[in-house]
Image (cartoon, rainbow, N blue to C red):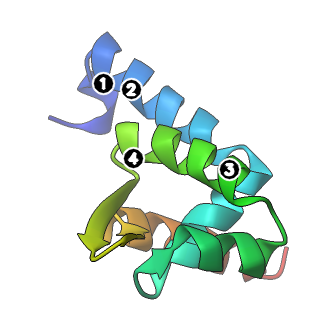
Amino acid sequence: MTILTQSDASVTQLADLFHLLGDPTRLRIVLACVAAPVAVGDIASLLNLSSSLVSHHLRLLRAARIVKSERQGKQVFYSAADAHISGVLHDMLEHIAEPG
Protein backbone atom coordinates (compact mmCIF):
# COMPACT_ATOMS: atom_id res chain seq x y z
CA MET A 1 0.00 0.00 0.00
CA THR A 2 1.41 3.39 -0.96
CA ILE A 3 1.16 6.54 1.12
CA LEU A 4 -1.60 7.87 -1.11
CA THR A 5 -3.80 4.79 -0.69
CA GLN A 6 -3.76 4.57 3.12
CA SER A 7 -7.13 3.89 4.72
CA ASP A 8 -8.89 6.56 6.76
CA ALA A 9 -8.23 4.50 9.89
CA SER A 10 -4.49 4.43 9.18
CA VAL A 11 -4.42 8.18 8.58
CA THR A 12 -6.30 8.77 11.82
CA GLN A 13 -3.89 6.55 13.76
CA LEU A 14 -0.93 8.37 12.26
CA ALA A 15 -2.44 11.76 13.11
CA ASP A 16 -2.98 10.57 16.70
CA LEU A 17 0.65 9.46 16.91
CA PHE A 18 1.89 12.83 15.66
CA HIS A 19 -0.50 14.58 18.06
CA LEU A 20 1.06 12.69 20.99
CA LEU A 21 4.57 13.51 19.80
CA GLY A 22 3.54 17.14 19.21
CA ASP A 23 3.58 17.80 22.94
CA PRO A 24 7.10 19.04 23.85
CA THR A 25 7.11 17.26 27.22
CA ARG A 26 6.11 13.92 25.72
CA LEU A 27 8.62 14.35 22.90
CA ARG A 28 11.42 15.04 25.40
CA ILE A 29 10.38 11.92 27.34
CA VAL A 30 10.50 9.76 24.20
CA LEU A 31 13.87 11.22 23.21
CA ALA A 32 15.17 10.35 26.68
CA CYS A 33 14.17 6.73 26.05
CA VAL A 34 15.75 6.33 22.61
CA ALA A 35 19.39 5.65 23.50
CA ALA A 36 18.82 3.08 26.25
CA PRO A 37 16.10 1.87 28.63
CA VAL A 38 15.56 4.40 31.41
CA ALA A 39 13.56 4.38 34.66
CA VAL A 40 10.77 6.86 35.41
CA GLY A 41 12.74 8.50 38.21
CA ASP A 42 15.75 9.00 35.96
CA ILE A 43 13.59 10.55 33.23
CA ALA A 44 11.99 12.84 35.80
CA SER A 45 15.40 13.94 37.12
CA LEU A 46 16.86 14.40 33.64
CA LEU A 47 13.94 16.56 32.48
CA ASN A 48 13.27 18.27 35.82
CA LEU A 49 9.70 16.93 35.97
CA SER A 50 7.74 15.11 38.66
CA SER A 51 7.68 11.32 38.51
CA SER A 52 3.87 11.35 38.46
CA LEU A 53 3.81 13.64 35.40
CA VAL A 54 6.36 11.45 33.62
CA SER A 55 4.35 8.33 34.50
CA HIS A 56 1.18 9.92 33.13
CA HIS A 57 2.85 10.74 29.81
CA LEU A 58 4.51 7.32 29.62
CA ARG A 59 1.12 5.66 30.06
CA LEU A 60 -0.19 7.54 27.00
CA LEU A 61 2.97 6.84 25.00
CA ARG A 62 2.87 3.15 25.87
CA ALA A 63 -0.79 2.87 24.87
CA ALA A 64 0.15 4.34 21.48
CA ARG A 65 3.07 1.88 21.17
CA ILE A 66 5.61 4.69 21.03
CA VAL A 67 7.49 3.37 24.07
CA LYS A 68 7.63 -0.06 25.67
CA SER A 69 8.25 -1.01 29.26
CA GLU A 70 10.25 -3.75 30.93
CA ARG A 71 10.16 -4.52 34.62
CA GLN A 72 13.48 -5.29 36.29
CA GLY A 73 12.94 -6.00 39.95
CA LYS A 74 11.01 -3.12 41.48
CA GLN A 75 11.77 -0.68 38.66
CA VAL A 76 10.20 -0.29 35.25
CA PHE A 77 12.45 0.79 32.39
CA TYR A 78 11.14 2.47 29.26
CA SER A 79 12.62 2.50 25.78
CA ALA A 80 11.51 3.37 22.25
CA ALA A 81 9.02 0.75 21.13
CA ASP A 82 11.04 -0.23 18.06
CA ALA A 83 13.50 0.91 15.44
CA HIS A 84 10.74 2.69 13.53
CA ILE A 85 10.17 5.16 16.37
CA SER A 86 13.89 5.75 16.84
CA GLY A 87 14.39 6.13 13.10
CA VAL A 88 11.57 8.63 12.62
CA LEU A 89 12.84 10.79 15.48
CA HIS A 90 16.43 10.57 14.24
CA ASP A 91 15.39 11.48 10.69
CA MET A 92 13.28 14.43 11.84
CA LEU A 93 16.09 15.76 14.06
CA GLU A 94 18.44 15.56 11.06
CA HIS A 95 15.84 17.33 8.94
CA ILE A 96 15.52 20.31 11.29
CA ALA A 97 19.33 20.54 11.59
CA GLU A 98 19.68 21.02 7.82
CA PRO A 99 20.30 24.58 6.68
CA GLY A 100 17.21 26.29 5.27
Q: Which residue is mark 1?
A: 10
Circle nearer the N terminus (4, 2): 2
Q: Are marks 1 and 3 in contact (CB under 8 Å)?
A: no
Q: Secondary structure at mark 4?
A: helix
Q: Secondary structure at mark 2?
A: helix
Q: Residue furthest bottom?
A: 35
Up the image or down, 47 lies above or below 7; here it is below
Please report the residue visible at 39 percent of the width from the left and 26 percent of the height from the top.
13
Horizontal side of residue 36 vs 19, given as left or right? left
Q: Could you say where residue 97 lies in the image, as x and y percent from the top left?
A: 75, 81
Q: Nearer the viewer, residue 88 or 61?
A: 61
Circle nearer the N terminus (1, 3): 1
What's the CA distance linking mark 4 and mark 2? 14 Å
Residue type, label 1: Ser
Please tell me whether mark 1 or mark 3 is closer to you in this view. 3
Residue type, label 2: Gln
Please report the residue visible at 31 percent of the width from the left and 36 percent of the height from the top.
3
Q: Which residue is mark 2?
A: 13
Dividing the picture into quadrants, the one containing residue 22 is top right
Circle nearer the N terminus (3, 2): 2
Q: Nearer the viewer, residue 98 or 72?
A: 72
What number is the disc on residue 52? 3
Q: Nearer the viewer, residue 74 or 89?
A: 74
